[in-house]
Image (cartoon, helix red, strand yellow):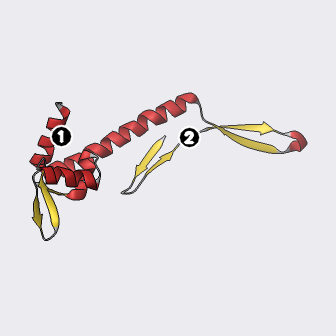
Amino acid sequence: MKFERNADAIYITINCICVTVGLIGGIMANLNLVTVEDLQQLKIELIEEIRKSRKQEESKMESKQWLRSSEVRHLLKISPGTLQNLRIKGTLPHDKIGGIFYYAYSDVAGLLERIGNR
């Protein structure tokens, strides 16, 4: 199996076992067979690729001192309404500059830690 990744997608090439089968009337057909082991290996490799991709995204976020709303929602896996509630309740400190909300990465990480310790 081979993986190729670009900004939008991961492409997977699976090598199959090809079997030539004789059919009635002398017509030949090729069948591609994928074994259970092939699928299990694909699953393992996909999970690893997803983990690598998530770690890269998280390391990009960690290097930033300030995050925008969309980045915070992505990290916390929350909706815009939930983020608004966190702002209103004062649970997540923020600054608003020119109509855009900014959040300190340290505050977001602290919130994640507090939520995880419940």
Q: Which residue is mark 1?
A: 112
Name the spot of residue 57 as percent of width and height, x first: 26, 49
- Rendering coords of residue 20 (x, y %): 74, 38
For the residue pair 59 and 3, the one nearer the viewer reads as: 59
Residue 75: x percent and y percent?
Answer: 24, 47
**Residue 71 drawn above or below residue 109:** below
| Residue 16 position (above or below residue 107) | above
| Residue at figure coordinates x 14%, y 49% from the top left | 89
The amino acid marked with disc number 2 is: Asn
**Disc 2 crowd, CA 10 A, few/some/many (<14, 14-19, 20+):** few
Where residue 68 appears, x then y in whole percent? 19, 59
Residue at the spot 42% in from the left edge and 33% down from the top edge: 44
Q: Which mark is residue 28?
A: none
Q: Residue at the spot x=59%, y=31% of the render?
A: 35
Q: Amino acid at mark 1?
A: Leu
Mark before the other along the chain sequence, 1 or 2 = 2
Single out the residue that lies furthest toward the top: 37
Task: Estimate the spatial distance between the alpha carbons at disc 1 and disc 2, rounded to whole Å.
Answer: 41 Å
Q: Which residue is mark 2?
A: 15
Number of on-image labels:
2
Please, what secondary structure does the residue beneath circle 2 have? loop
Dot 1: what SS?
helix
Residue at 36% from the left image edge and 42% from the top image edge: 50
- For the C terminus, the image quarter is top left
Residue farthest toward the bottom in the current orientation of the protein: 98
